[in-house]
Amino acid sequence: MGESRNMAEENNNKQAAAPKQAAAGKPKPPAKVKPVPAVKPGVPAKAKPVPAAAGPAKKGVYKPAEVRAEANPFKDSKTSGFSSWLQERFHVLNPVIDYLRKKEVPRHRLSFWYYFGGLTLFFFIVQIITGLLLLLYYKPTEAEAFARFVYIQTEVPFGWLIRQVHAWSANLMVLMAFIHMFSTFFMKAYRKPRELMWVSGFILLVLTLGFGFTGYLLPWNELAFFATQIGTEVPKVAPGGEFIVKLLRGGDEVTGETLTRMFAMHVVLLPGLVMLVLSAHLMLMQVLGASSPIGYKEAGLIKGYEKFFPNFLAKDGIGWMIGFALLIYLAVMFPWEIGVKADPLAAAPDGIKPEWYFWAQFQLLKDLKFEGGELLAIIIFTVGAIVWILVPFMDKQASREERSPLFTIFGLVVLALMLIGTFRVYLEYGW
Ligand code: HEM
């Protein structure tokens, strides 16, 4: 690295000397060009545009500069190392790299909870890789989807493993996102200036649940078919809901059209949106740094700081390895069933329920089985989501670095309601 830095420096010095060399040769430089000062390693010399010499510019009349910044300030450079080659091209990133090198993370007894964001990210990366592999064999049509799943499970070498890892990693990603959300909530990590981390995080959670919902139908089996029928029916009672149902289903009923739409959302729309929002989430994390719980600094509970690169990242890596081991164990020991092919003309079998992460909402819909109950449930979900996303802006005490027990109680109530709803579905239907 040291050598490459010198190399870059040498190149720049050469480049700084370029006008002098040119002066010795035939083509003379323009008389008014100032000598280019020595520059930082890898940073191109700035040739300041020199204003036109002929008299003061008239007001409102554009006078072009006589000398412009060099179009290719590195034309005389002879890079001999990959690192200096990169330096020349990406020198604008130097301050960013310096900043990240210096970045530190506080150490305290709740530091453990900071691994869950990274774990969510890890399972998302697993989803992208295994999803791409599944795409090589999957076909999103009513006639072929189920048969393709059977083929992947039974014929494709290691296809069973890829499919099981994809299915388990989806569940673990949702679980990690929930743990991450509630841990950041109870640590009040959403408080000023991290409000947008919370908002972008919540959007990520909704998109993650969208992945689960759209992916569920892709094997085109009986359970998924009827669960999707129930799930896509929900918006119907809301104003404008008929339109949403048609948009999701591609018609009035769940058909092959629905499969095509779910597939498009699952492999194009949602990954694109997640990439976009995730970039913002992670960039904010780098810019704002990790928070520490309220009052920890004042109470001397911060046990010091450690470098993000490489210390914290290495620990994150250990978390990822544990996550990977758990993932492989679950995929091998507890494979997901393929079930039987969906038959749209058959009656819905008993015990149709959505994936576990929708159980709380499912239970609420079941509890409100009276005239107008479904609409009430939709209002509760919508208002609840809006209040939840606005928490950082409402919790003024936390923004002033004061404890906010009311919000802690609110979070505990939300968590308890979700767990109770989920557990009740488990008691009634089993796993
Ligand atoms: C796809 C889903 C998500 C990914 C991949 C993700 C990733 C991350 C990562 C890597 C961090 C830094 C390490 C950490 O604090 O754990 C982080 C921080 C954070 N995330 Fe997320 N996140 C996701 C969803 C969420 C959700 C659902 C919320 C809340 C609604 C959220 C809110 C936050 C907040 C407030 C922080 C700052 C923590 C602090 O500075 O103390 N994130 N996220």
Image: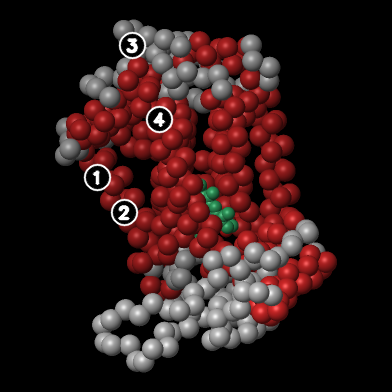
Give the residue pinned by disc 1: 379
Ligand 1 within 8 Å, label 2 CB: no
Task: Tell us which disc is closer to us: 2 or 3.
Answer: 3
The x and y percentages for residue 389 are 37, 56
Write the residue at 40% across / 38% down: 269
Ligand 1 within 8 Å, label 1 CB: no
Q: Is residue 10 above or below residue 222?
A: below
Write the residue at 61% across / 56% down: 113
Residue 4 visible in the current orientation:
yes
Give the residue pinned by disc 3: 344
| Amino acid type at image mark 3 | Pro
Give the residue pinned by disc 2: 386
- Which SS class for mark 3? loop
* Quarter-of-image position of residue 397: bottom left
- Which SS class for mark 1? helix
Colour style of the rendered protein structure:
secondary structure
The x and y percentages for residue 220 are 43, 17
Q: CA distance from mark 2 to mark 3?
A: 36 Å
Q: CA distance from mark 3 to mark 1?
A: 31 Å
Q: CA distance from mark 4 to mark 3?
A: 21 Å
- Which SS class for mark 2? helix
Q: Are marks 4 and 3 in contact (CB under 8 Å)?
A: no
| Amino acid type at image mark 1 | Ile
